[in-house]
Image: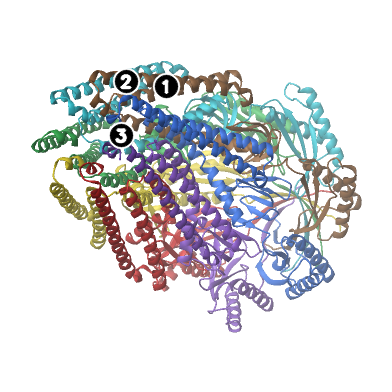
Chain colours: A green, B yellow, C cyan, D red, E brown, F purple, G blue
Amino acid sequence: MAELVDKADSMNIYLYTGLKILFIIVFWRIVNILLNKFIDKFFRLSPRLHMNEKKSNTLSGLMKSIVRYTIYIIMAISILNVLNIPTESILAAAGLGGLAIGFGAQNLVKDVISGFFILFEDQYAVGDYVTIGSATGDVEDIGLRITKIRSFNGDLHIIPNGEVKTVINHSRGNSLAIIDISVAYEADINKAIKILKDVGEKYYEKNKDKVVDLPSVLGITGFGDYDVKLRMTIRTLPLKHWSVEREIRKDIKEAFDREGMVIPYPKRVNINLNEKE
Amino acid sequence: MAELVDKADSMNIYLYTGLKILFIIVFWRIVNILLNKFIDKFFRLSPRLHMNEKKSNTLSGLMKSIVRYTIYIIMAISILNVLNIPTESILAAAGLGGLAIGFGAQNLVKDVISGFFILFEDQYAVGDYVTIGSATGDVEDIGLRITKIRSFNGDLHIIPNGEVKTVINHSRGNSLAIIDISVAYEADINKAIKILKDVGEKYYEKNKDKVVDLPSVLGITGFGDYDVKLRMTIRTLPLKHWSVEREIRKDIKEAFDREGMVIPYPKRVNINLNEKE
Amino acid sequence: MAELVDKADSMNIYLYTGLKILFIIVFWRIVNILLNKFIDKFFRLSPRLHMNEKKSNTLSGLMKSIVRYTIYIIMAISILNVLNIPTESILAAAGLGGLAIGFGAQNLVKDVISGFFILFEDQYAVGDYVTIGSATGDVEDIGLRITKIRSFNGDLHIIPNGEVKTVINHSRGNSLAIIDISVAYEADINKAIKILKDVGEKYYEKNKDKVVDLPSVLGITGFGDYDVKLRMTIRTLPLKHWSVEREIRKDIKEAFDREGMVIPYPKRVNINLNEKE
Amino acid sequence: MAELVDKADSMNIYLYTGLKILFIIVFWRIVNILLNKFIDKFFRLSPRLHMNEKKSNTLSGLMKSIVRYTIYIIMAISILNVLNIPTESILAAAGLGGLAIGFGAQNLVKDVISGFFILFEDQYAVGDYVTIGSATGDVEDIGLRITKIRSFNGDLHIIPNGEVKTVINHSRGNSLAIIDISVAYEADINKAIKILKDVGEKYYEKNKDKVVDLPSVLGITGFGDYDVKLRMTIRTLPLKHWSVEREIRKDIKEAFDREGMVIPYPKRVNINLNEKE
Amino acid sequence: MAELVDKADSMNIYLYTGLKILFIIVFWRIVNILLNKFIDKFFRLSPRLHMNEKKSNTLSGLMKSIVRYTIYIIMAISILNVLNIPTESILAAAGLGGLAIGFGAQNLVKDVISGFFILFEDQYAVGDYVTIGSATGDVEDIGLRITKIRSFNGDLHIIPNGEVKTVINHSRGNSLAIIDISVAYEADINKAIKILKDVGEKYYEKNKDKVVDLPSVLGITGFGDYDVKLRMTIRTLPLKHWSVEREIRKDIKEAFDREGMVIPYPKRVNINLNEKE
Amino acid sequence: MAELVDKADSMNIYLYTGLKILFIIVFWRIVNILLNKFIDKFFRLSPRLHMNEKKSNTLSGLMKSIVRYTIYIIMAISILNVLNIPTESILAAAGLGGLAIGFGAQNLVKDVISGFFILFEDQYAVGDYVTIGSATGDVEDIGLRITKIRSFNGDLHIIPNGEVKTVINHSRGNSLAIIDISVAYEADINKAIKILKDVGEKYYEKNKDKVVDLPSVLGITGFGDYDVKLRMTIRTLPLKHWSVEREIRKDIKEAFDREGMVIPYPKRVNINLNEKE
Amino acid sequence: MAELVDKADSMNIYLYTGLKILFIIVFWRIVNILLNKFIDKFFRLSPRLHMNEKKSNTLSGLMKSIVRYTIYIIMAISILNVLNIPTESILAAAGLGGLAIGFGAQNLVKDVISGFFILFEDQYAVGDYVTIGSATGDVEDIGLRITKIRSFNGDLHIIPNGEVKTVINHSRGNSLAIIDISVAYEADINKAIKILKDVGEKYYEKNKDKVVDLPSVLGITGFGDYDVKLRMTIRTLPLKHWSVEREIRKDIKEAFDREGMVIPYPKRVNINLNEKE
């Protein structure tokens, strides 16, 4: 550019410089207008973004301001540049500020990228019963930045998508009801297993709308301090396992009562020494 | 620029350089004045920023100082540049200092971005009963940088917004009262369930201002060492579940006393061996 | 470039500049078309990427948009450059934005690299029973970005591959059934060990389809508060150890009952002082 | 600069270069003097910085040394530059050293920024009773870099402000005394509640200087293994809750003794089997 | 380059540029071919890399593709450069992409460096019994990127070498069998110690193939609630300590039975108050 | 520089280049000598740096080597530069190596900065009894990089200063002796409180060299399962609280014995059912 | 360089370029040879680096390869540069690869720096008994990168020096034997203390080779549920405290037996209610 000066007369230089500045101003005004239109178009999609109009107006106004001021700064630096005024130090200062903001905004970007994959991979949908970190409940809302989960007791958990690592989705397959029962060491274990089997089969006959398979009595899962531990499992429709477990526990209790089988109390052998003091 | 020198006489060079320096000084003075005005305007909004006048004056003074000194440094480097004095080493030194400050200020930027989203997404409002990390209580104040929570026992928790990850909002939906009760293995479980149902229904009739649904007696939630565990749940208005639980517990205790049903003490079977030593 | 201007007449400069711009536009159009073709080709592989057609269309559309806008920006900067308009500040702004996105996208890259090695090193295959972090179950699906694990109770665990650190694969070798049994301090330990051995050998004879080795009775693994702890182990086919353990526990219980050997209840020596108060 | 050589005779070049070096030396001497004055001025504020004179002298000496050596290095590089000696490698070496220091000094910057906000937002003041991380006690001193907390038992906790995340301030609001009491299942619960109410009201009448509200007896907060758990709460002036709790506990014990109500001992039902061995 | 234009006629420029482009293309083709040869040579070592032929083909194909596309991009940028088309923006875009990949690939590099040192320092070898993090078992395979450990119960642990921090190698030295035994407060402790010593010495005589030293009875390691705790230790060959412990426990039990020494049951002093209620 | 060539004859160029190389060599030799002197001077301070002469010689030799080789590299690059040989690739390689070292050396810088503030702010001094992280004991040595703490049982804890976050200094203020005592529910609580008060006052009279205040009996701090919990506190000189607590406990035990007040044993109410089986 | 072309004829250019390339090749060959010599010299020190000859050969070969290929790349880039072929894109690609390796190699640098300080500050020496993180044992080997610790039970812990944070060195000072003993509430505490003192003094007389000070009986360290807790401490030579504790425990047990003092069994007060059911 400077070489051009070499050949032209100085009038021309000023003219040329002026034209450049004019071009810069016009160019960036056009960019500004285009970006504003883009922002407006983006926010006209707001119903799909779960935002009401007031919020969408606030946010689009904010984004337009950020764009406008960023363009003013770029414009100013470009003009200074054309005028041969050194701008390295301004660029460095702006760059450091921008770097701080960029680092701070990392979490925002992470949330959005993570949110995109949750939706795209359909990891969970509204209505699913999921566990994310320490929160368990029904998904009430999935946004690009946050997921809302309504837990059993009515609490609303608001989780940034970037915090969503491993997801446990309880609604994507049949559940398993697991019932553990103790019998005494002295008891007839074969009889106990038979009672469990009978109770399970009768339950299966009456509840085919909830249960998808015949129950299976697994056997002795362990020897306790004063009991033999038995386990029975039944495959149920998704999320039906809690009620199935409670109902089968009641059936077992009643069958045990009928058959004279008891769930044992803790036992201890006492060796008594009657000293005198 | 140097090439210009080629053609002009040396007088002109000094003049040209002098003009440039003058331009730089004037330009940055104007930028300084504009930024000061902007700061003043920003702080005139201070009532909306939860700041009293004294604080707002302190902060605006501080920010003006930072702006002034930053501009002085940029101005000095620009002039050195125009004078052909090498400035790379100064830029590098300033850049490293700025980098350290930029990294240190990351948390501040994170707090403000996080605070913006809390307000914009309405994750919680003043008066909501929320759990954030280890703090539970009523939200007393939400600022751009910190959230203040007043816990049940009167403590004030001051939390930087950047530390707010998952939020549990207890005020955005009906609560659930959960009452667990034990009966003995020997007891009549159907009778116990009936008592619970009666108590629940009577309570519902008398407390329709607190309770939104008929209670449900879920059944046997587990076999304990010496008790059968029953559970009853009632959907209540937000945050009413504590008092509902306490009142229903009292009703159950009285109904059990009336009906001769007891909550069992721990039991143990002792096998006594009377040795002689 | 500017020097070229030196020699040519100004008409030529404008022509030359115009030609360059034309070249830039044509060049990038071609790049755009090629990249679109590449994206289409990549997605025609989608059956191998576990994606249905709708998802694959959505994703390819999204990627084409990203490519198109990125090329527009590069094109604009190149043209500004040719026109001698300074672009450092735009480059810096775009670079910072890109940096923020790049940092945010780190997790995505990590997931894909990790996924590639899981598949390439065959760390686990669909159907294997594995433990990854806190999730244990059958692998249902392995993608480049996520692994899906179906746990015993029907829950679906969705784990980003970047979260997969140490993998425990339970299906890549025979399992070991471990049975711990207690006998009283007063009992005949040699007799107990003999019973265990007999039970184990009989079990081995009848279950050669599940068990791969004769069981070994290890001996006394510890002295408890009121019991001597014995351990028996049997090598089984992969994942058969749970059922083998349960069946052998039943056999031992029956053999102990037959032989008059008992699993001891907790014992305590009571020294009774009958005070008067 | 080299082009200038083109026109001038070589004498001039040496003169010009010499003048530049002179200018650089003079310029940086002035900067050094100005910075020293600034440091002195800063430390004359030292009483407001919680420093005694000796410390302030040490620190200002140290800072002047750092400034002096940094300026020497910048000066040396600038002169080498003017002499046409390549300096990129020195700049790179210095830059890397500076980067290491910059990273290491991050914590210092964080501490100071955090300290500024603690003071500015008045998160806690000297004398407040606060909990920060694992430290609880009275704030004894707040500096820009560290906070000192004196705990109940006399320990002094010294906490860098950058480690201060969530603050619990116990002095910014009335406290709540919470008294839990157990009564036996056989006891008359209404009578127990009445006693608690009477005790609370009498206490309130006599201690209006400590207590700000009538106590409230909440009711049955749970069923224990052998007791019904009751709770009473009273709102007190800040930090008075410990003494109020102790005094009310004594009043309750005495009222219970008077009324024949007892706090129950643990109970167990023993089923005795007298075996012979 | 541009100055060359100064002297030559424009024909020459185009020729010169064309030659350069040709050179670039030829140069990079050669680099490509050389790198492919290098890759082939590397994979011909695959038996030493624990890879089967199919895997080695897949991986070498993948690496050749990456090399080819990288070279295409470098070639394109170089040609654009020669043609005077600005490439800074492309470089920046490619750089950011590369940065993201570079950050994502950090773990891969860490794994390989860590793997190299494990092998070079011989921290563990195939067959050693080691503990790495939460995994304990026999090392089955050590690769550059992962280590495979087969645990006692048959599980296969797959650990990226970068996750290997502190290693516990149990096979690099004799093990120590530790046997803790309790005797009653009333018992003759010197007699108990003598029994232990006799048992240990007899065991040592009969098991010199497993045990490397005479056992040592350490003495009273603690006073329990109802027992005096004694400890005996024996140095054994690597990993023989478990079986030695079990065998010595059996010998002690038999010697105690012979000598009338007992391992005490828990004891409690009961002060009985026979109230009337 | 190249332009200079324009005017001079080629002899001059070689002469000029040679002179520059000479200057570079001389300049860096001088820098090397100066830095060696600085290192010597620094280490002559070594007695104040807690180093013996041998260590100080080792370290100064090492630092001189590092300086020498760094200067050789800078010198080589500068000369290559003067000879017009491209050095960007060497600079990049050296820069990356330096970056790796710089990152690795971060901890060292952190340790030294942290150590400076520990000394400057006098967070603890040699002889203080402090808790840092999991280490508690007397400070034996404070260096710029590490702090040594001698714990009660003789262990020496060596802590890098960068690991020192929150410091608990037990020697910077009077300690508080806290004595908890239990009395039975049936006991006369007023009498117990009176005994505690008497014991405390008598102790205070006899131990004014250790105790700085009259003890205060706080009252009932809680209701236990079978005891009323009382607490007494006394402010003592720093670190005297352990011996004061032990002595007062003995005084209380003796006073209780004298007055017939007992510390209660655990109590249980047994409801005996004599079943037949 | 290009300007040189201006004056010379084209033959000269090619000659000049050829000479430069020759110089580059010769220069880097020399650098390569020098570095190889340096590597050989370094490894001739290998006995002092704890390496056998085979390892040292492997490592020196590896390092020579790395050096050779790095120099080839630098050489190629330099030649391309001289030939006016653009190399920015290659530099960028190489830089990114180098960055990834640099980040991955951070841990290696950290280990070596940390290892240097461990040796230089003599934090521990071979033979010391130390605790580092979760590993406790005798230091068997200290290298620049790893420390090997042999634990009591024979395990070998291999710890990268960068993982060494806080070190507990048990061999740098006398140890303290701590013996806790319980006596009944009914016992004569002064008599118990006297017995402890006598035992301790007699032990001191007989074991002056292990014990460095008269033992001190601290007094009552706490009131247990059914015992008064007494403590005695003795300062011993390093690591002798375990055997001293065990021997004194035996002496105390014997003295207690002689004097009729007993260590109390757990006690409980039973309030018996004989119900009828």
In the foreground, A101 or D28 = D28
State the residue at coordinates (30%, 64%): D33
Where in the figure is residue C156, as x and y percent of width and height? 51, 30
State the residue at coordinates (49%, 36%): G101
In the foreground, D147 or E72 = E72
> Residue A120 is drawn in which quadrant?
top left
Q: How many marks?
A: 3
> Please, is residue C85 above or below residue E250 in the view?
above
Asked whether the residues under the numbered discs 1 and 2 touch, taking CB atoms below 8 Å apart as contact, a structural biologist would say: no
Which mark identifies residue E28?
A: 1
Amino acid type, label 1: Trp
> Residue A255 is drawn in which quadrant?
top right
* Dot 3: chain letter: A
Amino acid type, label 3: His
Specify the quadrant that holds the N terminus of chain C. Answer: top left
Where in the figure is residue D108, as x and y percent of width and height? 41, 56
Q: Secondary structure at mark 2?
A: helix
Identify the residue under disc 3. Answer: A50
> Please, is residue B241 above or below residue F54 in the view?
above
| Residue C109 in view in this figure | no
Where in the figure is residue B101, as x and y percent of width and height? 36, 52
Which mark identifies residue C31?
A: 2
